[in-house]
Image (cartoon, grey):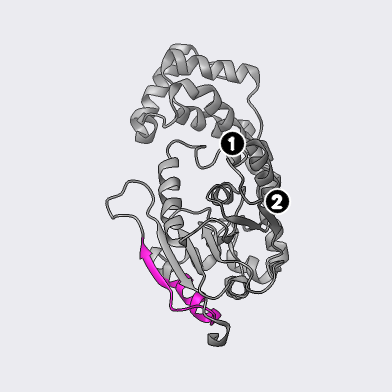
């Protein structure tokens, strides 16, 4: 809270908007959702819910003075509480994560546990995970359009066994179930898959659909027999895989001959979760990386890579790379 007179604080805010143009932009969150936005903002920046004094103070300024959540974020980030959190979290030496170093110092199993830790420590936002792809009105059109492109490439049909690689909280898996597929959610995070089970319980697919399977992936071997699935999809998750060559071989093992494996991704990712090679190149380079892993696996026909969204489409572009499983006799 500010101890200066209110009119002085207002003038300072006006000057701040002049100096920092980003603070003059309107919030993307509707004003009627300001209270919910404020709650999330506190949790993201201070890792706690807002205290009642802070909540009332900022909501009053939002209502009476036109304060935006952008400005609230700037003030909270400048607070002594956040600076103390930042200081306490800062390692004594190099604070940055080097993905190359992680890949050489941590095993695949240890890296997989970091994904589990991510979901386990953010379970307070479980409703946001379960609301995907509708959790964010700004992101929803892109997610829905991207998933539609992926589904079209899968050539799905009711009754097919479809493996959702990197399923996360399983909103894509649930869609596959609703299509009538026997969906298998595969992820390295058991907590993410538990969220997926909650999603199915809270929003059951309509009709008599095949029951889903939930499999925890140890990063090396998939607990499925050879040639046991008809389709594989990987929706915006391949850049998290620390051992893509080994994973591609294992995915090829469980895919039936003639079945397609479709990988899609956008130009958005969490840098601390993506492997180094993904961050070190551009979109075409990333498509080339996936194409090369298909080739090296020796179990797939030549892969096709393409920009799947029209160039003028608003939002993030969607790139796809897909290939079909060769017959066992054709493995190279």
Residue 157 appears at what percent x and percent y? 50, 58
* 271 to the left or right of 27: right
State the residue in front, 118 or 168: 168
Q: Is residue 256 visible?
A: yes
State the residue in front, 325 or 139: 325
Residue 147 appears at what percent x and percent y? 46, 51
Q: Are marks 1 and 2 in contact (CB under 8 Å)?
A: no
Where 177 sits versus 44, above or below? Answer: below
Q: Quadrant of residue 8?
A: top left
Under circle 1, the secondary element is: helix
| Residue at the spot 70% in from the left edge and 53% down from the top edge | 116
Under circle 2, the secondary element is: helix
| Residue at the spot 55% in from the left edge and 47% down from the top edge | 178
Identify residue for label 2: 117
State the residue in front, 4 or 56: 56
Image quadrant holding the N terminus, namely top right
Identify residue for label 1: 45
User: Please, which residue is most extreme toward the left here?
Assistant: 312
Distance from the alpha carbon under mark 1 to that under mark 2: 19 Å
Span highlighted in magenta in the image: 288-307
Where 124 sits versus 310, above or below? Answer: above
Let me know if residue 203 is in the magenta part: no
Residue 164 appears at what percent x and percent y? 58, 58
Total marks placed: 2
Residue 177's tag is none
């Amino acid at each position: 809270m500010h101890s200066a007179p209110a009119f002085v604080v207002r003038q300072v805010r006006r000057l701040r908007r002049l100096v920092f143009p980003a603070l003059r932009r309107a919030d993307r969150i509707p004003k009627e959702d300001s209270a919910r936005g404020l709650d999330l903002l506190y949790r993201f920046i201070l890792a706690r819910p807002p205290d009642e004094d802070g909540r009332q103070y900022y909501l009053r300024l939002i209502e009476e003075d036109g304060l935006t959540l952008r400005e609230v974020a700037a003030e909270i980030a400048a607070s002594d509480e956040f600076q103390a959190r930042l200081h306490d979290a800062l390692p004594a030496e190099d604070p940055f994560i080097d993905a190359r170093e992680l890949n050489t110092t941590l095993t695949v199993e240890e890296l997989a546990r970091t994904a589990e830790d991510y979901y386990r420590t953010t379970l307070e936002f479980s409703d946001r995970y379960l609301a995907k792809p509708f959790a964010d009105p700004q992101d929803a059109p892109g997610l829905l359009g991207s998933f539609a492109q992926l589904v079209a490439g899968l050539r799905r049909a009711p009754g097919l066994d479809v493996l959702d690689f990197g399923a996360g909280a399983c909103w894509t898996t649930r869609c596959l179930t609703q299509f009538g597929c026997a969906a298998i959610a595969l992820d390295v995070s058991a907590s993410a898959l538990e969220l997926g089970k909650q999603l199915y319980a809270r929003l059951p697919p309509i009709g008599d659909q095949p029951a889903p399977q939930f499999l925890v992936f140890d990063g090396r071997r998939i607990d499925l027999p050879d040639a046991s699935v008809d389709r594989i999809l990987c929706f915006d998750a391949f850049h998290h895989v620390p051992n893509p060559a080994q994973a591609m071989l294992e995915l090829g093992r469980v895919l039936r001959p003639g079945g397609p494996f479709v990988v899609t991704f956008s130009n958005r990712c969490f840098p601390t979760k993506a492997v180094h090679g993904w961050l070190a190149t551009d979109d075409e380079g990333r498509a080339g990386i996936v194409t090369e892993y298909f080739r090296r696996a020796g179990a797939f026909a030549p892969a096709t890579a393409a920009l799947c969204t029209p160039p003028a489409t608003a939002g993030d572009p969607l790139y796809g790379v897909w290939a079909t499983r060769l017959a066992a006799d054709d493995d190279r």
